[in-house]
Image (spheres, rainbow, N blue to C red):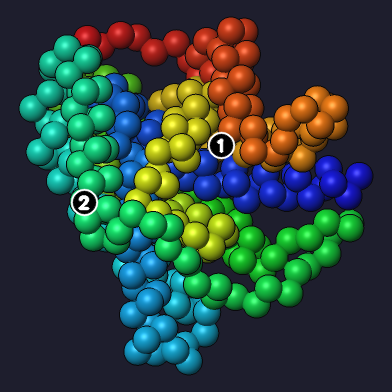
């Protein structure tokens, strides 16, 4: 039972990071009908920027509390990632809005490769240690362990997701985003500036990816230039699993995927008689996605989206 609770805790932490990145995928798809496969690399840029800021703080202000350093790192990573994503939208995607769907996909792969190359040139090829910011003393929950870092990460994810929901549901920009997602032509006739909505959507997705990137480094204590690919791909699976285009679906999909992956890592050895180890946990995200889409192609909370092309 203790193992089960431990894996649920680990899954919630992992799933919260998937959910933040999945929200970026689902928001862009909702307003633009585009899958930004470079989004995982924005997470990587956030993690690398956060690490750079933390190294500067440890050098010039070593006595600052860890949570203050983390807040500064996240606060610095967010505008950098927002700028990167807005530039990507402006340079790579804007001219392709009415192009055949294969063109933006190929462009996204090219942008991803470009970001990886730049990151490798700036930060190097080798994994980089991420400093421990909070005490390592664990908190016991029913025989399972959760660290102060994990508690803070869960709180950050919850606040970030709640803030996004409030923005989308309660603000003028949120209404414009929902109107554009529902019918961009009608929204334009009603005076909605679609270019502004799309830029804001890319910026919001980047902000969430920046938070997730710094969280990832703090939780796993190591990052590198290629780190964005697999989390980005799994977050995309989470968005599709929950129902891409639905922000609540992205949250649910991320949490569900994180829990299933963690449970799989904890029990795969027992289930296969020791034939497979926990390093095979990555297969669970894709197996679950295939099974769910076989039964419900629109995802857990998704509705059939009309083809706008």
Reply above or below: 113 against 128. Answer: above
Q: Can residue 36 be seen in this view?
A: yes
Q: Earlier in the sequence, mark 1 or mark 2?
A: 2
- Give the residue displayed 64% in from the left and 38% down from the top: 279
Mark 1 closeness class: few <14, some 14–19, many ≥20 residues within 10 Å: many
What count of labels does the image hold?
Answer: 2
Image quarter of the N terminus: top right
Query: Residue 41: percent from the left, percent from the top?
Result: 33, 44
Point out residue 258 in the picture as x, y percentages from the top left corner. Answer: 62, 39
* Residue drawn 52% across the image and 41% down it: 18
Q: Distance between the residues labelled 1 and 2?
A: 28 Å
Quarter occupied by residue 60? bottom left
Numbered circle sitting on residue 63? none
- Quadrant (top left, top right, bottom left, bottom right) of the C terminus: top left
Q: In this view, does 187 lie above or below 123?
A: above
Q: Residue at x 23, y 46 (%)?
A: 117
Q: What element carries label 1?
A: helix
Q: How crowded is mark 2: few (under 14 residues within 10 Å), some or many (20 or more)?
A: few
Look at the picture and state if 258 lies above or below 57: above
Label 1 close to label 2 by CB (< 8 Å): no
Toward the viewer: 57 or 309?
57
Left or right? Give the position of 285 relative to 81.
right
Would you identify the image quadrant in which residue 220 lies? Answer: bottom right
Please name whichever residue, 224 or 169, is drawn nearer the observer in this view of the structure: 224
Res. 78 visible in picture? no
| Tag nearer the camera, 1 or 2 | 2
Q: Which residue was labeled with disc 1?
A: 254
Q: Residue 283 placed where, x, y %?
A: 60, 27
In the image, is residue 146 above or below residue 165? below
Q: Residue at x 42, y 47 (%)?
A: 227
User: Element at badge 2?
Assistant: helix
Residue that carries the numbered disc 2 in the rendered image: 118
């Amino acid at each position: 039972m203790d193992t089960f609770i431990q894996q649920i805790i680990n899954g919630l932490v992992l799933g919260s990071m998937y959910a933040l990145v999945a929200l970026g995928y689902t928001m862009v798809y909702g307003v633009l009908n585009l899958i930004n496969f470079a989004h995982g690399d924005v997470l990587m840029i956030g993690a690398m920027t956060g690490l750079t800021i933390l190294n500067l703080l440890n050098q010039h202000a070593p006595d600052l509390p860890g949570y203050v350093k983390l807040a500064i790192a996240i606060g610095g990573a967010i505008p950098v990632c927002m700028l990167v994503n807005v530039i990507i939208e402006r340079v790579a995607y804007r001219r392709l809005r009415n192009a055949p769907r294969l063109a933006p996909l190929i462009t996204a792969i090219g942008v991803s490769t470009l970001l990886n190359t730049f990151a490798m040139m700036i930060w190097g090829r080798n994994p980089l240690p991420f400093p421990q910011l909070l005490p390592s003393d664990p908190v016991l929950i029913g025989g399972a362990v959760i660290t102060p870092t994990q508690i803070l990460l869960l709180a950050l994810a919850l606040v970030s997701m709640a803030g996004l929901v409030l923005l989308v549901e309660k603000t003028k920009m949120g209404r414009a985003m929902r109107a554009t997602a529902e019918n961009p032509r009608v929204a334009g006739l009603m005076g909605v500036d679609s270019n502004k909505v799309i830029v804001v959507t890319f910026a919001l997705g980047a902000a969430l990816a920046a938070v997730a990137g710094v969280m990832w480094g703090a939780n796993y204590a190591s990052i590198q230039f290629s780190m964005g690919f697999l989390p980005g791909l799994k977050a995309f699976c989470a968005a599709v699993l929950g129902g891409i285009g639905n922000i609540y679906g992205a949250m649910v999909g991320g949490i569900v995927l994180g829990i299933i992956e963690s449970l799989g890592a904890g029990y795969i050895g027992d289930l296969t008689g020791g034939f497979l180890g926990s390093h095979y946990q990555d297969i669970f995200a894709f197996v679950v996605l295939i099974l769910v889409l076989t039964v419900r192609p629109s995802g857990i909370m998704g509705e059939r989206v009309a083809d706008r092309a």
